[in-house]
Image (cartoon, rainbow, N blue to C red):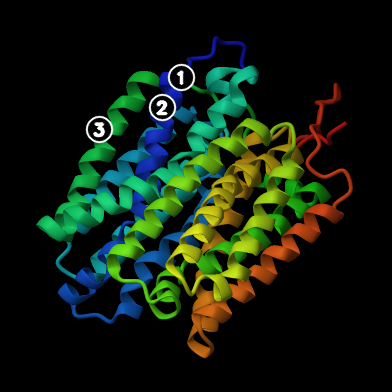
Amino acid sequence: MPTTATPGWPAVVSLTLGLFAVVTTEILPIGLLTSIGADFTVSDGTAGLMMTLPGFLAAASAPLVTAATARTDRRPVLAALLLTLTVACLLAAAATDFRLILVSRALVGITIGGFWSVGSGLAERLVGPSSAGRATAVIFSAVPLGSVLGVPAGTFVGDLAGWRTAFAAMGALTAAVLVMLLLTVPPLPPVQATRPTVLKGALGRRPVHLALLLTFLVVLAHFGTYTYVTPFLEQVTHADDAVITVCLLLYGAAGILGNFLAGARVHRRPRLVLGLAAGLIAAASLLLPALGRSTAGALALLIVWGVAYGAVPVASQTWFTRALPHAPEAASVLFTSSFQATFSAGALAGGAVLDRTSPAAVMTAGGCVAALTVLAVTAAPGAGRPRRATPTTPRQGEPAAPA
């Protein structure tokens, strides 16, 4: 760890706003999908590539971008990624062909993988070890904030002035965040070069295998179901558009609460936080087919679900960090890749189940996967315990083994 003084909370806020821009841009097409598809005369299924393409590219780009910039100061890397996101938004706003939209979304995917991998593990360097937990919670609040504020605002702008204006506005916001980041974030030399050999060595560690398994299960359970919660509310709850909007907003607000509740406890009790989050997701999705037939029941369960999922990203990141205490950036790379790949895989798997069954069956299947996560967390011996650095020097190209 560098010996320079920590720069403090303004840098954390800049990083959080950067991730907010990344998250919002990633999921912005959800509210604009039909409008964009209609303008370019493509089906909703084809327009859906705007969501799946960035996720898979983010999973691939996380290790590639991080390895390619392994010896580069993290500040200009983050700035370059925000500049790429700005260009992507403006390209989408000016696109004359759907293929240009997909090029834009490819740039978004590269930014997601790089920015999350480089930025999500910087909390301790920015505020010091004593405030790392709170700073991590603030940084990860970008995820629910993007859902609660970013997407509804983008959809509103799109309805009012067209989807191109929504993307142009995101480009302007990202450019402003870029300026703020350059003003508040100091030089951050890489602590350890995250070369491919480091990642290869990390993938051979059993604690990493456990973190990958738990992330895969809980993210698959969540995105395999939540992606299709709107069809459930329409077909099973028989909710109108206004009620669905209220449900999703309250879900997102609950996610913010869950994020901060988890951030305050996850560094001390990572097993409890992730197990409880997975258990609540399992309970909510398994109970929805029965209790979600009424608006009150669906709303109550979605609030529980929101609190639970709000804890998942920060909990998953913590498990990877504990698995690789000497290679925090490698931990962020593996977290980002596994999360984004499972994000897209979960949406595809849930869609396949939905096409063959019903929204209620999707909820039940996802609940069973979440229950498996609880079993895996419970059965893992000594998982998630804090690990102390050893005085020995790791072999070149590999993270050191924990004590």
- Residue position for label 1: 9
Q: Nearer the viewer, residue 220 or 6?
A: 220
Q: Quadrant of the C terminus?
A: top right
Kindly identify the amino acid type of the residue bearing the numbered disc 2. Answer: Val
Q: Residues within 10 Å of mark 1 (few under 14, many from 20)?
A: some
Kindly identify the amino acid type of the residue bearing the numbered disc 3. Answer: Ala
Labels 1 and 2 touching (C-beta < 8 A): yes
- Residue position for label 2: 13
Q: Position of residue 152 (x, y in %)?
A: 29, 53
Labels 3 and 2 touching (C-beta < 8 A): no
Question: Whole-Å distance between the Cαs marked 3 and 2?
Answer: 13 Å
Question: Whole-Å distance between the Cαs marked 1 and 3?
Answer: 18 Å
Find the residue positioned furthest to the left.
Answer: 161
Please tell me which residue is depicted at 69% across the width and 44% down the height of the picture. 273
Tell me the SS state at disc 1.
helix
Please tell me which residue is depicted at 31% across the width and 73% down the height of the picture. 47
Q: Nearer the viewer, mark 3 or mark 2?
A: 2
* Location of residue 166 with respect to 129 vertically, above or below: below
Residue 338 falls in image quadrant:
bottom right
Question: Whole-Å distance between the Cαs marked 1 and 2?
Answer: 6 Å
Q: Nearer the viewer, residue 325 or 314?
A: 314
Tell me the SS state at disc 3.
helix
Q: Quadrant of the N terminus?
A: top right
Please tell me which residue is depicted at 33% across the width and 64% down the height of the picture. 243
Which numbered disc flags the more N-terminal residue, 1 or 3? 1
* Location of residue 349 with respect to 328 vertically, above or below: below
- Residue position for label 3: 176
Please tell me which residue is depicted at 51% across the width and 58% down the height of the picture. 300
